Image (cartoon, rainbow, N blue to C red):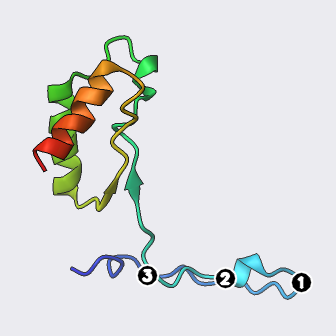
Amino acid sequence: MKPGSKYQPFPSVDLSDRKWPSRTIAQTPIWCSVDLRDGNQALTVPMTVAQKTEMFKVLVDCGFKQIEVGFPSASLTEFEFVRRLIEEN
C-alpha cells in the first residue's frame, strides 16, 4: 500500500471569513523520529548503546526515513552510539 493512501482527506469546513478551515494536506507528511535523542537525562536508567542500536533498527524496520539519533557531545553513550552508526553504516 502506498504511504498516504490508507487515509482519506477529511471534508473541509466552509467558513468564508476564515482561511485555515478550508486548507487541506495534499501529501503525506514526512515523519521524523526523535525517540533516540538524549532526552535520556530524564530517564532513571538511560538506554545503553546496545539498546539504542536495537531501537534504531526497529525504527528503520517501521519505515522511518529520518531519525534524529542524538547529540554526540551530550554524553559518552551518545558519542559511542553515533560513532557506531557511522562506522557500521
Residue type indicated by callout 2: Arg
Q: The N terminus lies in which quarter of the figure?
A: bottom left
Residue at x-position 36% and y-position 78%: 4
In the orientation shown, which residue stands out farthest toward the left?
Answer: 88
Residue at x-position 22% and y-position 36%: 83
Residue indicated by mark 3: 8
Instruction: Indicate which disc residue 58 carries.
Output: none
* Quadrant of residue 56 within the rendered picture: top left
In three-dimensional space, the C-alpha distance between marks 3 and 1, rounded to whole angstroms, equals 26 Å
Q: In this view, does 20 lie to the left or right of 72?
A: right
Residue type indicated by callout 1: Asp
Residue indicated by mark 1: 17
- Circle 2 SS class: loop
Asked if the residue under mark 2 is in contact with the one under mark 1, i.e. CB atoms within 8 Å, the reply is: no
Residue indicated by mark 2: 23
Comes first in the chain, label 2 or label 3: 3
- Circle 3 SS class: loop
Return the residue nearer the eye: 49 or 26. Answer: 49
Q: Is residue 43 above or below residue 53?
A: above
